[in-house]
Amino acid sequence: MTRSLALCADDYGQSSAIDRGILALAQSGRLTEVSCLVNGPRWPQAARELAALAAVRQGRVRTGLHLNLTEGRPLSPELARLWPQFPSLETLIVDAHLRRLPEAALRAELQAQWQAFEQGRGKAPSHVDGHQHVHHLPQVRVPLLALLAPRADIRVRHTGRVQGPGYLVKRMLIEGTGGRALGRQLVALHRQANTQLFGVYDFVQPDYRRLMQRWLAALPETGSLIFCHPGEALSVQEAFDAPADPIAAARVRERAYLASDDFKADLQAADVRLV
């Protein structure tokens, strides 16, 4: 029986090299969703490039907000006064679980990033997720779900059932730092979400095709989502100007595979279609 899959590229808007890779994959029908970082200086231009893409205009690729609290600077004055730079993921996780995050300023930041997306895209996001899964953390998920309360059609990435195979510790950390709690709230609120999540690995494994084959083999009939991080290689000038990207090599490998005939063949062999 043919199984359906949503395939989402994260981190759109982070750099021109990442954006080029994602745009090419989206236009060629190799993605169903794009999640956008909106707090960086590239976002206005990235939003225009996204809007110009036929696959986006025609609704074949949906665009969502990739909520960011760990890279770059806050958009809201309220949070920027407290955090001139976002903290590391480790610091954010600890402070969230100790209930030390500035709740009022965080609500302002969520609203600011939401507004930046709407201004760039001219519409609300089709879905919301988090850069490094920050959207499921304590003190983040509650104001996020409150922001989404009047918008029942917007999906939220469910990080409470992160499936393998492999990378069990990393998957358990994602579920345990807030994914399962978010999942329970999504069910209680009847909020649209994926039922299972795939895509976790260490960004070191060079054989991305083998990873994808294993994920495809494990998919349920419906409701699954794979997140990915494709991008093109930086030019010399881009490498000089852009902030360091620790997963840059993995992005290039992912983009090469997803653009290849191998990916198309693997979808067919697994009887999976992108929807």
Image (spheres, rainbow, N blue to C red):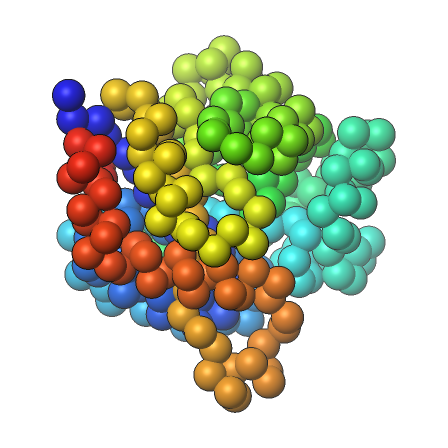
Residue under the point 62% across and 40% down: 134
Q: In the displayed structure, would residue 63 be above or below residue 239?
A: above
Task: Tell me where residue 244 appears, x and y as whole percent.
Answer: 64, 70
Residue 154, compared with residue 106, is above or below; it is above
State which quarter of the image contains the N terminus.
top left
Q: Is residue 141 above or below residue 55?
A: above
Q: Nearer the viewer, residue 265 or 61?
A: 265
Left or right position of 72 against 272: right
Q: Give the residue displayed 57% in from the left and 35% down from the top.
A: 167
Front-lying residue, 170 or 222: 170
Figure quadrant of residue 36? bottom left
Question: Which quadrant of the rendered structure holds the C terminus?
Answer: top left
* Residue 144 horizontal/vertical position (percent): 57, 33
Would you say 38 lies left or right of 2 here? Answer: right
Residue 161 at x, y = what percent? Answer: 50, 23
- For the question of whether residue 155 can be seen, the reply is yes
Q: Position of residue 20 (x, y in %)?
A: 36, 70
